[in-house]
């Protein structure tokens, strides 16, 4: 039975989602022996809690219902947030996939983990969340859906099981990530386990099944088709798109979010059936958002505006409070130390991220004072695919104001996010001393520059694929 609009808009309970989700249960496709096999338990000295970390590529927070969006894109995420913990103001460390996921899985900024370019991999001396959990007795598995989160860049380290599901352009049906995850859970996992899932489904091309498009797409007669190819042509000045076209792109994007949300519901149903859900810490986030002419651009990777940096973090499970929202400004680098804290595992001393659990465990109202940074943009300086410059646009935030800096033009902009969350009014000229202070922090941060080891050039097939995705 499909979830109708009325159910979606009010927010289903977890039990209702498990009952009414739109996907057919995978159990029907599994043999009875697998239904009963269960996950054997490993002996371990740490808390017996499973961890499921889900990264939904290209999901901007302001298109999720629990973050205030009015369309029913995310009933499953909304329900998890209502029963768990939501961080309202999360800043990514980078506007594209590779460096942002490096931060998510290491607790370090890109200039500390060294992943800023497709020519480098994760340094051996940078420790990942999967490596730490593996050493503490966790069964570890990952299913990823982007070359930029694959073994090529060292993301397979610490995983007993690692599968890269290759990206497919114009994929209307859900990707194989969910199937691969359920297959591992059914056949191979042992508790406690760490499962990392990276979904690429809502990345352009913006496509989904007809029933989702019917729910979200309004009448439209323009040229926008949601394909990456057309959006690249727009970047090159070869196609014209206006705000009417942007609205249609948003409709296509929203439909794909809803399809993705139903995929998460499918995973939750399976975990519930296997009696794994109540003993699992679930963390859902994203690497970056997407542009829909908010500041004149499309896709992502080139700017540090909020449409790209504001991402969700939703947590649910053991040790997480129920029905709580936190307004503190936090970062993707905070995910790793917070997860380790909930598992009673010491975190590495060199992390950039903070353990966020004191915000709800000890009634702490604030984190220690700090600046949050965003870096590792990927800019094309001239319309030539060979001329790509990395790490040009940078930003620093603390916490109401956000300063943007262009390392080529030396241009500085500053925005008051409390009064101008869309970053339309540059107030740098009104706050000279604050600009100086924040820029000084950014300059100090920029003196750190770790670069990962070089790796062999991309194959012709990989180059072509990344071009089709708008990355090259």
Image: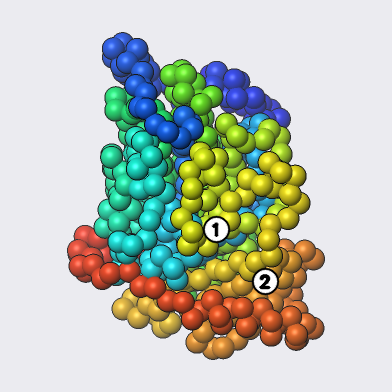
Quadrant location, the C terminus: bottom left
Q: Which residue is mark 1?
A: 353
Q: Residue visible at 56% across and 82% down?
A: 443
Residue 416 visible somewhere in the drawing: yes
Q: Nearer the viewer, mark 2 or mark 1?
A: 1
Label 1 crowd bin: few (<14), some (14–19), many (20+), radius 10 Å: many
* 406 left or right of 329 in image: left
Residue name at image x 55 percent, y 80 percent: 444
Outermost residue to the bottom: 409
Q: Is residue 135 left or right of residue 243?
A: left
Q: CA distance from mark 2 to mark 1?
A: 19 Å
Q: Is residue 416 above or below residue 11?
A: below
Q: Is residue 294 visible to the viewer in this orientation of the structure?
A: no
Between 176 and 198, the one nearer to me in the picture: 198
Under tag 2, what secondary structure? Answer: strand
Residue 209: percent from the left, percent from the top? Answer: 45, 37
Number of numbered discs overlaid on the protein picture: 2
The quadrant in which residue 204 appears is: bottom left
Specify whether 140 is left or right of 219.
left
x 60%, y 86%: residue: 411
Residue 264 lies, in percent from the top left, at: 49, 34
Badge 1 marks a residue whose secondary structure is: loop
Q: Nearer the viewer, residue 280 or 100?
A: 280
* Frontmost residue, 88 versus 340: 340
Q: From the viewer's side, name the closer residue of 329 and 16.
A: 329
Residue 224 at x, y = what percent?
51, 58
Circle 2 residue? 402
In percent of width and height, residue 81 lies at 64, 37
In the figure, residue 289 lies in which quadrant?
Answer: bottom right
**Within 10 Å of the Cα at label 2, are there few (<14), some (14-19), or many (20+) other Cα atoms?**
many
Residue under the image location 52 percent in, 40 percent down: 344
| Labels 2 & 1 near each other (Cβ < 8 A) | no
């Amino acid at each position: 039975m499909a979830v109708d609009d009325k159910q979606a808009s009010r927010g289903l309970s977890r039990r209702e989602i498990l009952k009414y989700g739109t996907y057919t249960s995978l159990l029907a496709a599994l043999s009875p022996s697998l239904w009963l096999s269960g996950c054997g338990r490993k002996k371990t000295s740490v808390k017996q809690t499973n961890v499921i970390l889900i990264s939904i590529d290209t999901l901007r927070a302001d298109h999720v219902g629990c973050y205030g969006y009015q369309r029913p894109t995310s009933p499953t995420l909304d329900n998890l947030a209502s029963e768990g913990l939501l961080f309202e103001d999360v800043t990514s460390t980078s506007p594209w996939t590779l460096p942002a996921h490096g931060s998510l899985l290491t607790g370090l900024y890109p200039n500390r983990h060294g992943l800023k370019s497709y020519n480098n991999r994760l340094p051996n001396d940078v420790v990942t969340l999967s490596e730490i959990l593996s050493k503490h007795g966790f069964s570890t598995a990952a299913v990823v859906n982007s070359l930029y989160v694959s073994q090529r860049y060292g993301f397979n380290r610490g995983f007993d099981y690692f599968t890269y599901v290759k990206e497919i352009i114009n994929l209307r049906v859900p990707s194989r990530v969910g199937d691969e995850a359920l297959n591992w859970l059914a056949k191979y996992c042992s508790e406690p386990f760490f499962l990392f899932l990276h979904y690429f489904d809502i990345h352009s091309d913006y496509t989904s099944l007809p029933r989702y498009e019917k729910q979200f797409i309004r009448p439209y007669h323009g040229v926008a088709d949601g394909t990456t190819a057309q959006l690249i042509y727009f970047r090159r000045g070869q196609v014209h798109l206006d705000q009417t076209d942007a609205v249609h792109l948003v409709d296509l994007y929203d439909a794909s979010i809803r399809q993705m949300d139903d995929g998460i519901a499918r995973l939750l149903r399976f975990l519930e059936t296997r009696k794994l859900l109540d003993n699992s810490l679930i963390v859902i986030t994203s690497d970056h958002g997407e542009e829909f002419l908010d500041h004149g651009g499309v896709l992502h990777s080139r700017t540090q505006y909020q449409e790209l940096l504001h991402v969700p973090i939703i947590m649910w499970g053991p040790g997480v409070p129920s029905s709580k929202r936190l307004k503190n400004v936090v970062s993707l680098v905070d995910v790793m130390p917070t997860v380790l804290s909930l598992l009673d595992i010491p975190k590495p001393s060199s992390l950039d991220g903070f353990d966020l659990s004191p915000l709800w465990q000890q009634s702490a109202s604030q984190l220690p004072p700090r600046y949050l940074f965003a870096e590792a943009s990927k800019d094309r300086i001239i319309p030539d695919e060979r001329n790509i410059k990395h790490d040009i646009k940078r930003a620093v935030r603390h916490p109401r104001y956000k300063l943007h800096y262009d390392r080529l033009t030396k241009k500085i902009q500053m925005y008051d996010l409390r009064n101008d969350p869309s970053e339309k009014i540059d107030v740098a000229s009104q706050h000279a001393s604050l600009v100086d202070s924040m820029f000084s922090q950014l300059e100090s941060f920029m003196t750190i520059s770790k670069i990962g080891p070089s790796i062999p050039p991309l194959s012709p097939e990989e180059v072509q694929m990344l071009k089709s995705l708008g990355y090259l």
